[in-house]
Structures are given as C-alpha cells and as structure tokens.
Image (cartoon, rainbow, N blue to C red):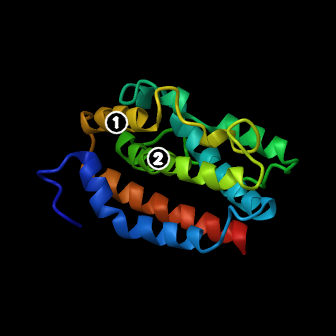
Amino acid sequence: MIDAQNLTLTESLRINTKEAHEKLDHYLTNLGLFNNIQLYKKFLALQYYIHHNASNYYNNHSLKNIIPDLTERNHFEKIKEDLNDLKMEIPNLITPLPEDIDPSEAVGFIYVIEGSKLGANTLLKRIKKIGLSETFGARHMKPDPEGRGASWKKFQDAINNAKLDIHTTLKSATITFNQILAYAKFVTT
C-alpha cells in the first residue's frame, strides 16, 4: 500500500486500488459484453447484483451526512427497469450487504460504483450499436443530471472532506473490486 498521508482520499483510493481495478476491467473487456444483446444481458445481471447490494448503502441515513445527494445517485431502480425492457427475470439474489455498517467501509464500496459511472459514456456508445440506449435497456448508464464529471467531482469533494478511516476505506474498495470480479465470473461462466 502506498502511503496516503499527503494524498486526498480519492487520490489514495485510485492509486491503491489500481491493480484490482485493472484486473476487473481486463476481465470484463475480454468478454465482449457489448457485442450483442445476449452478452449484454450478462452484464446487466452483473449490474443487478452489484447495485442490489449497494442499495442499502445508498439509502443509509448516516451516509447521507457524508454524501448529501446519495439517494439520487442510486441506480438500482433503473437497472430493474432495464431488466424489464429486455424481458429478463430478476436474477437470484446474493446475500445483501448489512444495513448497519462502518461509514469508512461503505464509502469504499460506493467509491467503486460511483467511479464506474465515468466509463458509462464509452459503454453507451457501444450499446447503441446493439439497439439499446439511455431510455431502453441501459437507463442505469444515464449520467446524473449535472453530468458525469461534475457529479464525480461533487462525490470526490464529499468523501475527501469526510472524517473517515482511510485504511478501512482502501480495504473496502479493494474488496469491492474483487467481489465484483467474482460476480462477473459467476454471471459469465
């Protein structure tokens, strides 16, 4: 782990989770999940699992003190609409995350999800080639109202200014990347 003493929380997260992040990106990129609807459905099932777990965090009252617009950032309902668009059954649930959690741990998890929204713009361009869009099948990829960059900056500012245990947050973010990789392998094999 790189010493995070002179870095913001988000700088430290980016640097210290780089390996886990790249491992997940490499796995997902090699699957071609945006080449056709059937493969995209696997990606959407993955999103369902991730966001089902995250929903408890996005609705947690104590976390809203750290990230005031947290509830509006929750894309779980949009994912359920996307599943409905594609006539997909709701996937069997994986055990949800506990509602009572350490804020430092929760922020690590949310950091991974919020960061993934930055890449959604590129994914939307690929998804349009298979007939999906922000209004059908890929609603969960629509940017927040203020735009991706502004939304990400607002999120970064909120967590950088929070009183969190940096080591707990770093550990949680790394575990989250690895858990998403496990979910990805589950839905694609």
Q: Residue at x 78, y 55 (%)?
A: 92
Q: Is 164 situated above or below 38?
A: above
Density class for disc 1 (Cα within 10 Å; few <14, some 14-19, many ≥20) is few
Residue annotated with mark 1: 153
Q: Residue at x 18, y 55 (%)?
A: 4
**Looking at the picture, which amino acid does disc 1 mark?**
Lys
Q: Is 43 situated above or below 76?
A: below
SS type, badge 1? helix
Q: Position of residue 158 (x, y in %)?
A: 32, 32
Q: Quadrant of the N terminus?
A: bottom left
**Looking at the picture, which amino acid does disc 2 mark?**
Leu
Q: Nearer the viewer, residue 64 or 87?
A: 87
SS type, badge 2? helix
Residue annotated with mark 2: 118
The disc at residue 68 is: none
Residue 79 appears in the rendering: yes
